[in-house]
Image (tube, rainbow, N blue to C red):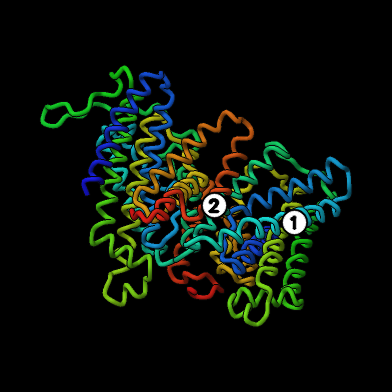
Amino acid sequence: MSKAVLGVAAFLLFVFVVVPLLIAATGRWDLYYTLTSVALLSIGSMGVWLTFYIGRINIGQGAYALMGGYVSAVLMTKAGFSFWATLPLAGIFCAVISVAIGLPILRLRGVYFAMVTLVLTEVTRLTALALPVTNGAKGITSIPLPGGLSVFGIPLIPDFATLENPKLAFYLLAVTLMVLSFAALWRIVNSRLGHLCRSLQQNEELASSIGVNTAYLRVLAYAISSFFGGLAGAVFVAISQSIYPSSFVVNDSVNFMLYCFVGGLGFVSGPMVGTFLLYFGWDLLSIAKEYQLLIYSSAMIAMMLVLPNGILSLLDRKGGKK
Amino acid sequence: MEQILANGLYLGAQYALIALGLTLIFSLMNVLNFAHGQMYVFGGFVTYTVVAQLGLPFIVGLVASALVLAVMGALIEVFLFRPVIRKSKRDESTMLLAAGIAFFLDAVILLLFGEKQRGVPKIVGGVLNWDMRIIMPYDRILIGVLAIALIAGFIALMQYTKAGRAMRALAQDRVAAQLMGVDVDRYSMIGFALGAMLAGLVGGLLVTITGINLGMGGPTSVKAFMMIMIGGAGVISGAIAGGFILGMMESIGLTVLSAYGDITYLAIFASLMVFLAFRPQGLMGKPWG
């Protein structure tokens, strides 16, 4: 146990102190954007991972990221909400929508569910194009940066627009959210709810025959998953200060799923590891120019041939667990 | 009205052909082939290269597309899917592999053929005008008829040949088929090659009408998934039904709903959700298992 605490402390120290120091020392400010994206994408993949945990293949996270982004953008530009208020609202909106969508489609399994969620991404994009409030293909632009946040007059977070280095601020925001999401996910997995989810993953009929409310659990897990997706989308919008119907497309949804796979589905940290490897690897490969996609996809195929159960399955062989 | 039906039939014939390849691969190997749309695009580019650049007749291009894609499908099955299926703990791992192959094919298409929209000249000119009720270019009719002929040929192959019977047995029960002496490895390979070949053929057919570009792969896969959901995964009659139903719905939707903007697919998806709530396995799919 103390080893785990040490590990978490080392990780926190690394992401909050060592990384900013290293970047300040080397002057690679552009890395902040990459790392912020990694942190946000891994929040989305954590949601996907949770749906994997109940035995469903979710390729629709892009839909919720897009929804969350639009909710945040519309509330900020049209209703004058502060960014910090829209952040949970975006998540909750996605969770509510996902309950409505999830009730019918979560009865599907395997590839059927996977296909429906994939189509959902495409349909969300089309909805964003068609609805008047989203401003169609022109999207919503010049969204203000997050303002300051204070509780009972004590300033907690400064106004991002006044900061000399909003990149660092966004990085810290994204990483904080990632750590919080990870903690939440870890808590869920290691609670009664997590055990019930595992029973769903193994055998849904058996679970329901011994009194597990499978329908309720499925929807709950899917709603939590979509909440994560909406959260990630909302922060992305704040960073890019704009959102278009094509901000999250089918490829992004597939990527969310791939991040989970690459990291390993049996590990809570799988989505984070997978996102980091794939996104960072993709970024590094940009030196290969037109061969970038070729090398990236070949590496992915090769990895499947060598390690079909994810990178973290390397730990399994040494007898380690979780 | 007649015009809508004719458009629907024409669209449906193409869609059904795409869905057939996907459902064949799914029923034999339990693999959702994400790369299906990319295979379709690849087939289109092969036909384009043969017809527009080498100046050979269209039928040669079509045959070339079919052959190239069949070989590609066979190689992908033998060297990629087979080892991964054997080693992986979960069935879903093949989805990552399929997605990886989709990216890989995208990269190959980009390097080989570039990112421009390509098309070949019309194979037959002229427009059929039946009393202003149905107006349709002859080349569309030809492609539609060819697609229907290919579907019929495919059904005949599955029904009346030894390979077709073996593949149907494999789709029903892999272990039982093996016990009856079906060479499972061999027919998985043939099935995958056949599925890929169908994708290539549709690409070759459609390059004459809509042209082809790199970005078409993903949306084509999404449409194929919808058809399979309507008809039921892994069932050949279901794929055909799903293809024609989606074609009809698209044709009707584009006419009736055009006043409200581009919401055809939204409406189709909403009705699909309602439909799936009542019949999760699709029209003709078997219940779970």
Seen at 69% across and 48% down, the residue is B41
Where is residue B204? Give x, y as percent: 76, 52
In this figure, which residue is indicated by the disc labeled 2?
A306
Q: Nearer the viewer, residue B136 or B274?
A: B274
Q: Is residue B272 visible?
A: no
Seen at 30% across and 26% down, the residue is A169
Q: Which mark is residue A291?
A: none
Q: Nearer the viewer, residue A234 or A23?
A: A23
Badge 2 marks a residue whose secondary structure is helix
Q: Which image quadrant for residue A193?
A: bottom left
Q: Is residue A201 visible?
A: yes
The amino acid type of the residue labelled 2 equals Val
Q: Chain ID for label 1?
A: B
Q: Is residue A29 above or below residue A307?
A: above
* Quadrant occupied by the N terminus of chain B: bottom right
Task: Please state if B271 lies on the left or on the right of B70 as rendered.
Answer: left
In this figure, which residue is indicated by the disc labeled 1?
B71
Badge 1 marks a residue whose secondary structure is helix
Seen at 67% across and 39% down, the residue is B110
Seen at 42% across and 55% down, the residue is A317
Q: Which image quadrant for residue A152?
A: top left
